Structures are given as C-alpha cells and as structure tokens.
Amino acid sequence: EVQLVESGGGLVQPGGSLRLSCAASGFTFSNSWMDWVRQAPGKGLVWVSGINTDGSSTTYADSAKGRFTISRDNAKNTLYLQMNSLRADDTAVYYCARGTWGAFDVWGQGTTVTVSS
Amino acid sequence: DIVMTQTPLSSPVTLGQPASISCRSSQSLVHSDGNTYLSWLQQRPGQPPRLLIYKISNRFSGVPDRFSGSGAGTDFTLKISRVELEDVGVYYCMQATQSPTFGGGTKVEIK
C-alpha cells in the first residue's frame, strides 16, 4: 500500500524549532518528487516547500524561505522539514505529498504544529 | 505567484443533481513543455486532500467517472454529474505550472 506518515508535530513557543518527518512506503521513494503543504485551522491549502528526487534542488514559498529547510534521506525513505524561528502564523496541519504529473497524488494524514506561548 | 480564484465559495446541491466549480488563474497555466498543470483535489471533513483530476481532465486512479475536468489557458471547471452523499467536502484547484498555488476552496454541501 502506498503510504505517507508524518510525525514530529507538537506545541512550540514562538521563535522555537521543530523537525517534521514523513515516512514513505509502498513506492520507490527515491524516484519521487516530494512536497510539504500546510493548512491553518479552518483555512485552505498552502504549498510550503518541494524537493527533487536526489535532494539537489529545493524550492520554498516566500513564507518559508530562510526559516524552513526541506531535505530527504532516500536510504531511509524519509522526507524532512526543519522549521526554525517559528511564528504563530505557522500554526497548521502539515502534510507531505508526492508530486506526480504536476499534481500531488499521495498525501499523508498530516501532523499538527501549534506555535503558542 | 499565480493566483487561483475559485467560484462559488459554497455550492448547496440536491442529491443526484449536478454541480460545477470554476477556477480561474491570474495567468496562463500552459507550461513551456506544452502541458497544463491544473489539478483538482477533494477534502472530505477531517480528512487529508485527495487527488481527483490532474492535467485539466485526467481522472486519477479510483476516481468515479461522475467527476470530470475541462478548460484551457486560464479558465477551468470541475463537474460532478450526479452528486452523492460521499461527495460532500471542500474542493480545491491547484496549479503546478509554477510554484504550486491553490484556489481558496469550494464547499459542496447537500441541500
């Protein structure tokens, strides 16, 4: 079964850091572009960051540039998002998703990040 | 960034009746490779998004054929031919011709 499972979310104070993980199974992870998408409470979907198959190319939304770092470990079939200098408006459910045919065809269940003092 | 605008915000529909959602982009979604990377996703309450349609009109695996996509350039439409109870949720269009952006979402609910 093709599956993505996120972890690492939680409650963090403003200015703090978190590292999200996304474990992939059921497909060839090393052949797949991967992305992070977030959804603030009651709001729509917002793309955060993407990474190519070998990790040599990364892209970020303006809101993530300079604070977030996407990476991957193909040997462990795992995608990461290192988030630093967190702000209240980073509070959201964070989804990892697989990119295929210019769309996101596989989504995880999401992990919740809450930034609050 | 490409701005995606969806209408309507909400669509109350009678079971068995059709529904239509419009999505307009602020610039053409035709990529330099000739493809148009416009997709549609469904998000049921409490669930992650699910891909329905990719590259304007291609139904993803397992998606019922009552869902169809059409359009070109900057104007796109998702149609549900006969709405069923399981179709209740929020629908998003998304472009990936440039860095991905999503429409604001359209809530489909039963009258």
Image: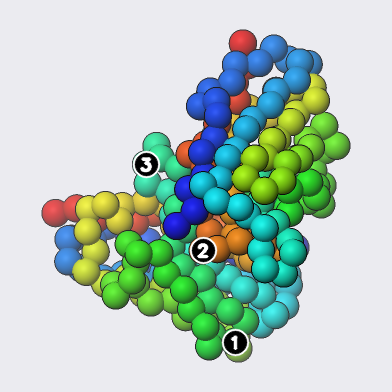
Secondary element under disc 2, as helix, strand or loop, is: loop
Callout 1 crowding tier (Cα within 10 Å): few <14, some 14–19, many ≥20 = some
Q: Distance between the residues labelled 2 and 3?
A: 23 Å
Q: Position of residue B3 (x, y in %)?
A: 48, 48
State yes or no: discs 2 and 1 in contact (Cβ < 8 Å): no
Q: Position of residue A22 (x, y in %)?
A: 52, 69
Q: Residue A41 carries which label?
A: 3
Residue at horizontal 59 percent and vertical 21 percent from the top: B11
Q: Which amino acid does label 1 sit on?
A: Asp
Please determine whether, in this image, residue A59 is positioned above or below residue A56: above
| Quadrant (top left/top right/bottom left/bottom right) for the C terminus of chain A | bottom left
Q: Give the number of the mark in front: 2 or 1.
A: 2
| Residue at the right extreme, as displayed | B65
Question: Of residues B61 and A23, which is closer to you in this image?
Answer: B61
Q: Give the number of the mark in front: 2 or 3.
A: 2
Determine which residue is flagged by label 2.
B99
Determine which residue is flagged by label 1.
A54
Q: Residue B50 carries which label?
A: none
Q: Give the number of the mark in front: 1 or 3.
A: 1
Q: Position of residue A50 (x, y in %)?
A: 51, 71
In the rendered image, which quarter is residue B69 located in? top right
Q: How many numbered circles are shown? A: 3
Q: Mark 1 lies on which chain?
A: A
Question: Of residues B64 and B26, which is closer to you in this image?
Answer: B26
Q: Which chain carries label 3?
A: A
State yes or no: discs 2 and 3 in contact (Cβ < 8 Å): no
Please determine whether, in this image, residue A54 is positioned above or below residue B4: below
Residue B107 visible at all: no
Secondary element under disc 1, as helix, strand or loop, is: loop
Residue B70 visible at all: yes
Please determine whether, in this image, residue A115 is positioned above or below residue B4: below
